[in-house]
Image (cartoon, rainbow, N blue to C red):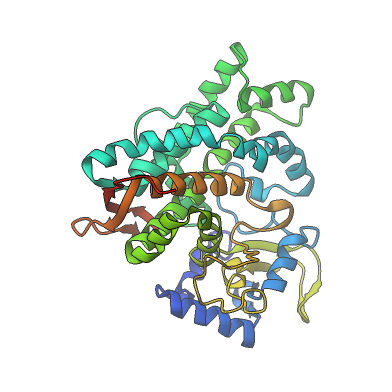
Amino acid sequence: MTGTSGKPTRDLLFPDLSDVIDERIAWFQHQHKNEPLRHRAEYNMWEVFRYEDVQTVLKNPETFSVTDKTHMGLPFSFGRADIEEHRFLRGFVARSFVPSTIEGQAPAFASMVDALLEPALASGKLEVLGDLGYPLMDHVIGHLFGLRIPGPGRFRQWSDQMFGQLVGIFQPDHAEVVGMLTEQLDERKREPTGDLMSALLAARAEDDRLPEKKIIHMCLDLVTAGNAPLSLFLSYTFARFCADPAFYQALRRDPALIPGAIEEVLRFDFSWFNLWRTARHDTELAGYQIKAGSYIVAWDSAANFDESRFPQAHRFDITRSPNPHLPFGQGMYICLGLPLVRTLGRVVLERVVRTFEEIRADPDRPMRTQERMIDYVVSLDTLVTPAKASVP
């Protein structure tokens, strides 16, 4: 399909993706062997499937531009800022996402997780996203960035809207959240604090390339930088716990397996991601001639099942090493929120395996997914059994 501007939209790719993971992997690997680049002339578009070729696209923004990719209507996204603007703006916020900085907050994150799990100890029920994922990110955003999200469920609504717009299925009105951020920005002008918004205001005083509107839009983008990936990670991981109790018990017996499990979930279960670029000039990729202005769809999810990089890629293997997966991009445009997902994901799983002996799907409340995006989990209700004693 194409949008009103004549550009292709993401939903034209969905029909190729089976809801059955084995069929999806088989299609990816068929493309690797038989059609590593697929030209869809009616859309002026090339789809890229092999790891090496996807990596080439993602690591060379001088050839494959982010700024002319399909328009998503977002007010701002670090993923759409061109090279110089991206470097300039990312420099202001990257320190908040440095792995060592995020890791230093792990004890605070653990306390947040413990408090959120406390009600489930009494009730025996845990809705993974509503009781844990979204409230956790609400607390983390306040803790790291100083942003206040008013009202229960509001953050979840805004985050779902932003991610749905990112993948091309929603066109929400951002007036409410922009208004909230504007009010908080005005507060920082009157009374600066040590948070990210205050730091951006201080930087603006020294550089007029950072207008207040851009600060607001940057904060809006950052609000979802870690939330959508973390929510997806938690929903996929807990769904695996429910489907495969042995997987959960393996992590309980040996929590040292948790980091490897995180990486394998990111590789295997984020199997519907793709990243869009536009060829800045005529170029060659894997022997194919690509004209300037062509749209490029880099199937990073397909790259994650390329046997040349991931032997027995169809197997879910938490001991896989190395595991250089690509669901969050690569190069200068790699997702800012990845260190946050890794640290929070590890902390959550460490606290969960200590707290609960078993996790099962609630038979009365089946998992719900987004109607137009089957891989986007809306709710996941589980039944939990408190641990009789802490695991080592």
Q: Is residue 374 visible?
A: no
Q: Is residue 317 visible?
A: yes
294 to the left or right of 374: right
* Picture quadrant of residue 155: top left
Residue at the (50%, 61%) spot, across then down: 265
Along the line of sight, which residue is nearer the eye, 76 or 268?
A: 268
Q: How many marks?
A: 0
Vertical comparison of 239 with 47: above or below: above
Vertical comparison of 359 with 302: above or below: above
Whole-percent x, y for residue 18 in the image: 43, 75
Whole-percent x, y for residue 153 in the image: 35, 37
Residue extending farthest to the bottom is 34
Along the line of sight, which residue is nearer the eye, 229 or 73?
A: 229
391 to the left or right of 179: left
Residue at the (28%, 53%) spot, across then down: 382
Along the line of sight, which residue is nearer the eye, 18 or 360?
A: 360
Vertical comparison of 89 with 277: above or below: above
Whole-percent x, y for residue 338 in the image: 60, 49
Whole-percent x, y for residue 387 in the image: 31, 47
Residue extending farthest to the left is 364
344 to the left or right of 208: left
Residue extending farthest to the top is 190
Residue at the (59%, 54%) spot, across then down: 71
